[in-house]
Image: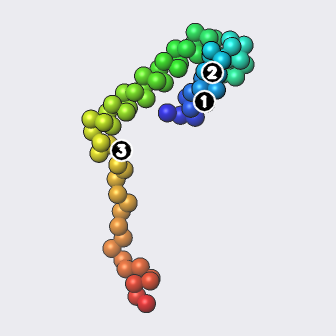
Amino acid sequence: MDRFDRDILDFVRSWAPYGGPPSDEVIAEFGLTPNQFAERVDLIISAENARRDRELRQPWLRVGSPAPRSSAPSANALE
């Protein structure tokens, strides 16, 4: 998820207690019509759900590859 998507979700969360964001706020903040905004929110949520489902099925995907080890001894090892 990129920053724009995170900003959208933060915006939606902040307006949720009030029944959702007003149309003029959506347009001013993101330059999207209310329909475009709703579609974008649905896409973000669907993509995040798919990513989480993949991680649950294949937990090793969450683990990054290990950092390469240097074969040379460290300076502290020589003391």
> Which comes before the other along the chain, label 2 or label 3?
2
Labelled pair 2, 1 in contact (Cβ < 8 Å): no
Q: Is residue 56 above or below residue 72?
A: above
Q: Nearer the viewer, residue 21 or 17?
A: 17
Q: Quadrant of the C terminus?
A: bottom left
Q: Nearer the viewer, mark 2 or mark 3?
A: 2
Q: Nearer the viewer, mark 2 or mark 1?
A: 2
Label 1 residue SS: helix
**Dot 2 alpha-carbon crowd within 10 angstroms: few under 14, some 14 to 19, many 20 or more:** few
Q: Nearer the viewer, mark 3 or mark 1?
A: 1
> Which comes before the other along the chain, label 2 or label 1?
1
38 left or right of 18?
left
Q: Which residue is mark 3?
A: 62
Label 2 residue SS: helix
- Residues at marks 3 and 1, CA–CA distance in whole angstroms: 24 Å
Q: Which residue is mark 1?
A: 10
Q: Nearer the viewer, residue 42 or 31?
A: 42
